[in-house]
Image: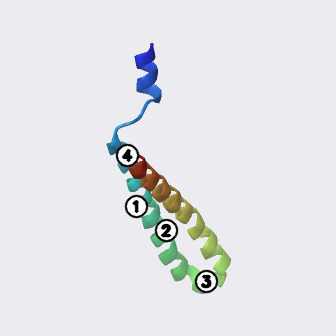
Amino acid sequence: MNNALNDAFGPMDPSNCDFFLIVSMIGALVMIMSLVYGIMKYSENKSILIIALSILQPFVLYFQNRLLYNMCIGSIN
């Protein structure tokens, strides 16, 4: 019973930190794509608020997963 709990809630393999790195890269890519799309559509809308809000979500995704990746790597060392 104790072994099953340790497997379920114990420390994970260090290679699982790569998940946060991959999601962080995806967030950065989406953020860049949103920025380019917002700049292209700026002439139609003339609203910087729409561009800022469309970039905010990917930025939070990028920053949060970058922070989690650094915490994961730091806890291993």
The residue indicated by pointer 1 is 25
- Classify 67 as above or below 16: below
Q: Could you tell me which secondary element the residue under label 1 belongs to?
A: helix
Name the mark nearer the viewer: 4 or 1: 4
- Classify 32 as above or below 43: above
| Rendered residue at 34%/43% (across/down) | 14
Name the mark nearer the viewer: 3 or 4: 4
Q: Amino acid at mark 3?
A: Glu
Q: Residue furthest front?
A: 77
Q: Are marks 3 and 4 in contact (CB under 8 Å)?
A: no
- The answer to whether residue 76 is left or right of residue 5 is left
Q: Sequence order check: which comes first, mark 1 or mark 2?
A: 1
Q: Sequence order check: which comes first, mark 2 or mark 4?
A: 2
> Residue 52: x, y in percent?
62, 74
Cα–Cα gap, marks 3 and 4? 49 Å
- The answer to whether residue 41 is left or right of residue 76 is right
Name the mark nearer the viewer: 1 or 2: 1
> Residue 50: x, y in percent?
64, 74
Residue 76, disc: 4
